[in-house]
Image (tube, helix red, strand yellow):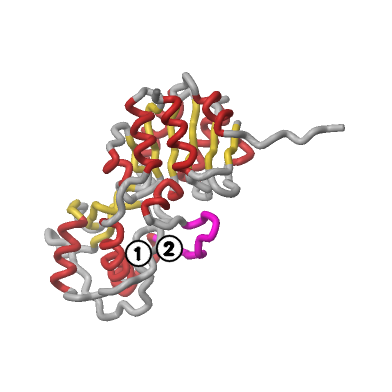
Amino acid sequence: MDTLTPPPTLEDVRTLLAGRRTVVLTGAGVSTDSGIPDYRGPGSVPRQPMTYQEFVATPQAQQRYWARAHVGWRHMTGAAPNAAHHALVALERAGAVDAVITQNVDGLHEEAGQRELVTLHGRIADVVCLDCGDRTSRVALHERLDAMNPGYGEGAYAIAPDGDALLEETSAFRVAACERCGGRLKPDVVFFGENVPKPRVERCRSFVDAADALLVVGSSLQVMSGLRFVRQAAKAGTPVVIVNRGRTRGDELATLKLDAGCAETLVPLASSLAA
């Protein structure tokens, strides 16, 4: 009679990654312990974020976006790196991790001290003008919006994974224009419906090409921008380890799939591999 194969364990992950040059791909699950919700984890409330096409279509869409983003920014700036972020830094410093590719825009990997890092979807802390290309600080924009909208959105609001506050009424919000050309401002992040810049993708591909293993942490891999690196590794015969609560789109390509939390896996992993 056939016996059931037991599910993978943390020890299996540790054994597979030991001595291998590992590249890590992180998703929103890494930041949930920092108080930033994810889109698709267990218990997540279904939400369709604004697409790039919606954002550029009308001034009203830009007003709605910036009103919610302005209020949500206060929450995002209060988030701090958690044990998962710090464990990845420890693994990098010990030589157990070569690089981290993150789908997150919250800046927490940088704040924790990650050195070899690609922010695949950009950073919410940066702002770009769609008309002249000028780049500025989100902190500076927040101060301008505060001055233009005194007292706006004070109080407690639910926060979406991209940092937006879930406001319903935004018609009174005043939107700031680019100080250089008067153009449209957008956070320097990749919206749904927008392409990741090609040089950024190629840098990630080069990391995956050089890796002995790919470790995916806290991502459901529903978005092709992350899944493509799992497909790349699997096609090359590079072992793929996925650590995530619930199913992912890359499970069938994984060498090992551990249904577990990010910090509860990365902290003991760092304790052993970085020792």
Q: Which residue is most to the top? A: 19
Q: Are marks 2 and 1 in contact (CB under 8 Å)?
A: yes
How far is disc 2 from disc 1 in space, using C-alphas?
A: 9 Å
- The C terminus, quarter of image: top left
Please name the residue that numbered disc 2 is placed on.
Answer: 49
- Residue occupying the point 31% across, 35% down: 114
Of callouts 2 and 1, the N-terminal one: 2
Q: Nearer the viewer, residue 225 or 165?
A: 165
Task: Identify the mark at residue 150; answer none if there is no mark.
Answer: none
Report how many numbered discs are placed on residues in the image.
2
Is residue 54 found left or right of 44 in the rendered image? left
Q: Nearer the viewer, mark 2 or mark 1?
A: 1
Residue visible at 27% across and 37% down in the picture: 113
Query: Residue tagged by mark 1?
Result: 164
**Range covered by the magenta-colored residues:** 39-51
Q: Residue at x 17, y 62 (%)?
A: 178
Task: Residue at 19% x, 63% y: name it.
Answer: 142
In this rendering, position of residue 184 left or right of residue 217 = left
Magenta stretch contains residue 114:
no
**Whole-percent x and y of residue 161?**
40, 58
